[in-house]
Image (cartoon, helix red, strand yellow):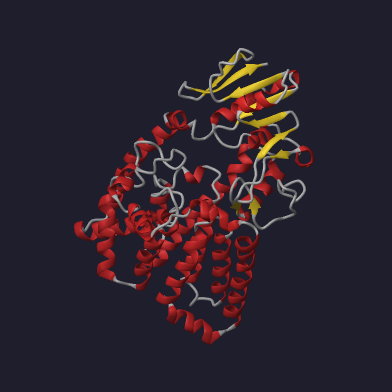
C-alpha cells in the first residue's frame, strides 16, 4: 500500500483488506502505510501508530472524565489509571488496530457531549464514530448502540442544535448513510459474513453467559488467558480498583446526572461484541471498557475523599496504584517476553534473522505453517518486493469462506512439511519443521528455540 496503493491481492486502495479468514479494516493499515513510507518497513513503523493512538486514548480519557464530572482531578486520575491499566497496557504497545478504534470512539463520545457548545461538534463526532467502525470490528456493534444511548440521554441538547441549524444534522445523517454502503457490500457480496459465521456464538443462553463472564471475578482477577492480551498471573484490573469501582458506583447513585448514567450505560454495552462471538471473556473485543472503568475508578477516589474528608487521599491512591504497577511492569519486562514468545510466533521471525544468509545455498526453503501464516514474516523481514510477490505467488485453494493463504512464492514454500516432501521431488532444500522429523533423508543442522528454551522449529538440510 505504501509503495503502490495496492494491497496483497493487487486491489487499489481497498476499504476492506482481504486477510486469512476475515476482512481487515482500513484505518490502521493506512496509518502504518504512512509510517512505512516515512521510516521504511520495520517494526517501528508497524507499532508507532498504535502508540500514538493509545496516547490519544490517554488524553481523551482525561477530557472525557473532566467533561462528565466537571472535575479536573477526576480527569487527571482517569488518564493516570488508563495509562497503567492492566487491561490496556499490552494493547497500547503492540500493533493492534483496536487502538485506533478506541481513540475515535472516545473522541466521538467527547464531542457528542459538547454539541450544545457548537452544533458542528455533532458532525465531527459522527465522523469520529464512523472512523471507529472502520478501525476495529467490535466498534461496528458498540458504536451504533453507544450513539443510540447518547441520543436518548442527551435528546434536549440535540433538539437545541436542530433549532439552531439543521445543516450539521443533515450532513451527519448523510455521512452515516454513506458509511454503511461499503459495510453492506462487504457482507452482501464479498464474503464478509463468512467471518462472522466463523466466530459468532450460537444460542441465547451462551450469549448471556458470555456477556456476564466479563464481569466475573475469575476474569477480572485472573485476566484473559490469551498471552497476547494479558500477562499470566495478572487480572484485567489492579487490585485497588476492586475497592474504587464500588465506590465509583456509589458516587453515581448519589449524583445521578445524565453524564454519569451515560458512563454506566456505555460500560454495559462494551461486552456485547464478545458475547455474540466465541472465546469469551475476551479482553481485546471489550477494549472499550478499559478507559470507562478508569473513569469509574477515579469517581471512586472522589467518593473516598468525601468519606475521609482529606485531599491526602489522592497521593495515597496514586502511591498504592504505582506499587501494584511496579510489579506488573517488572514482570512485563523480565518474564512476559519469555512466557509469551510462542504466542507471538517468535520462531518464524528467527528464521529470517538467523538463516537469511543461507537461503542462497538452497533451491527451496520449506517452512511449516503449524503456528499460523509464516509467509507474512518472509515478506516483512526480507522486505520482499510486493510487485514481484504478486507475480509469482501461488495460493492454496479457496476455502468455503472465500479466502485462501499463500502456498509458495519464489523459493519459499509453506504448509505441512511431511506432505510437501512426500508429494514433491525435493533434492536441495532448507527445511524448518515444527516437529522433530524421523525421516532419514533429513539431516538436522540446528533448532530455533522459544525464549523459554523449548524448541519452536527444527532446522534440516536436504
Indicate whether 227 appears above or below 265. above
Q: Residue furthest bottom?
A: 163
The number of numbered badges drawn on the structure is 0
Q: Measuring 61% from the left and 25% from the top, which residue is drawn there? A: 418
Query: Depth check: 190 or 40 in front?
Result: 190
In the picture provided, is 16 more to the left or to the right than 102? right
The image position of residue 102, as x and y in percent, is: 50, 56
247 sits to left or right of 14: left
Quadrant where the C terminus lies?
Answer: top right
Q: Is residue 24 visible?
A: yes
Given residues 11 and 241, the one toward you in this image is 11
Residue 376's x, y, as percent?
A: 64, 37
| Image coordinates for residue 404, horizontal then vertical, percent | 65, 44
Q: Observer-nearest residue: 290 or 341?
A: 341
Instruction: Tell me: residue 424, above or below residue 198.
Output: above
Left or right: 91 as drawn, with respect to 413: left
Q: Residue at x 48, y 45 (%)?
A: 91
Quarter occupied by residue 309: bottom left
At x 30%, y 44%, the residue is: 221
Q: Position of residue 421 (x, y in %)?
A: 66, 23
The foreground one among 107 and 63 is 107
Q: Is residue 300 left or right of residue 204?
A: left
Residue 68, located in which quarter of the rendered image?
bottom left
- Please report the residue visible at 25 percent of the width from the left and 69 percent of the height from the top: 254
Taking 338 as reference, is 460 above or below it?
A: above
Query: Is 69 located above or below residue 191 in the figure?
Result: below
Q: Is residue 312 visible?
A: no
Which residue in the rendered view is the most extreme toward the left?
A: 308
Amino acid at each position: 500500500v505504501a509503495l503502490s496503493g495496492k494491497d496483497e491481492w493487487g486491489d487499489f486502495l481497498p476499504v476492506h483488506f482481504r486477510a486469512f479468514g476475515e476482512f481487515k479494516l482500513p484505518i490502521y493499515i493506512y496509518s502504518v502505510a504512512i509510517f512505512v513510507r516515512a521510516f521504511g518497513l520495520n517494526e517501528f513503523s508497524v507499532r508507532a501508530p498504535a502508540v500514538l493512538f493509545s496516547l490519544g486514548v490517554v488524553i481523551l480519557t482525561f477530557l472525557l472524565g473532566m467533561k462528565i464530572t466537571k472535575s479536573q482531578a477526576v480527569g487527571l486520575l482517569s488518564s493516570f489509571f488508563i495509562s497503567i491499566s492492566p487491561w490496556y497496557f499490552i494493547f497500547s504497545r503492540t500493533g493492534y488496530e483496536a487502538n485506533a478504534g478506541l481513540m475515535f470512539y472516545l473522541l466521538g463520545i467527547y464531542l457528542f457531549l459538547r454539541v450544545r457548545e457548537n452544533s458542528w461538534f455533532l458532525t465531527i463526532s459522527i465522523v469520529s464514530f464512523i472512523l471507529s467502525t472502520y478501525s476495529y470490528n467490535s466498534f461496528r456493534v458498540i458504536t451504533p448502540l453507544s450513539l443510540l444511548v447518547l441520543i436518548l440521554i442527551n435528546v434536549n441538547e440535540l433538539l437545541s442544535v436542530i433549532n439552531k441549524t439543521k445543516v450539521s444534522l443533515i450532513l451527519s445523517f448523510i455521512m452515516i448513510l454513506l458509511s454503511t454502503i461499503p459495510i453492506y457490500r462487504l457482507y452482501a457480496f464479498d464474503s464478509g459474513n463468512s467471518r462472522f459465521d466463523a466466530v459468532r456464538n450460537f444460542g441465547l443462553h451462551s450469549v448471556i453467559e458470555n456477556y456476564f463472564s466479563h464481569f466475573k471475578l475469575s476474569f477480572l482477577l485472573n485476566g484473559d488467558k490469551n498471552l497476547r492480551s494479558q500477562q499470566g498471573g495478572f487480572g484485567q484490573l489492579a487490585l485497588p480498583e476492586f475497592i474504587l469501582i464500588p465506590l465509583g458506583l456509589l458516587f453515581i447513585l448519589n449524583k445521578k446526572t445524565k453524564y454519569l448514567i451515560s458512563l454506566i450505560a456505555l460500560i454495559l454495552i462494551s461486552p456485547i461484541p464478545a458475547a455474540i462471538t466465541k472465546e469469551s471473556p475476551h479482553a481485546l473485543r471489550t477494549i472499550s471498557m478499559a478507559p470507562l472503568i478508569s473513569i469509574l475508578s477515579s469517581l471512586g477516589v472522589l467518593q473516598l475523599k468525601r468519606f475521609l474528608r482529606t485531599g491526602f487521599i489522592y497521593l495515597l491512591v496514586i502511591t498504592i496504584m504505582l506499587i501494584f504497577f511496579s510489579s506488573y511492569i517488572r514482570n512485563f519486562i523480565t518474564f512476559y517476553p519469555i512466557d509469551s514468545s510462542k504466542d507471538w510466533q517468535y520462531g518464524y521471525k528467527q528464521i529470517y534473522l538467523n538463516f537469511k544468509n543461507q537461503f542462497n545455498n538452497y533451491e527451496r526453503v520449506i517452512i511449516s505453517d503449524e503456528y499460523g501464516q509464516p509467509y507474512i514474516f518472509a515478506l516483512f523481514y526480507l522486505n520482499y518486493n510486493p510487485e514481484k510477490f504478486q507475480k509469482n505467488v501461488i495460493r492454496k485453494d479457496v476455502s468455503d469462506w472465500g479466502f485462501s493463504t499463500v502456498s509458495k512464492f519464489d523459493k519459499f514454500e509453506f504448509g505441512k512439511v511431511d506432505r510437501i516432501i512426500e508429494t514433491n521431488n525435493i533434492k536441495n532444500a532448507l527445511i524448518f519443521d515444527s516437529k522433530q522429523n524421523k525421516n532419514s533423508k533429513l539431516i538436522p543442522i540446528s533448532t530455533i528455540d522459544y525464549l523459554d528454551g523449548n524448541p519452536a522449529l527444527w532446522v534440516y538440510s536436504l
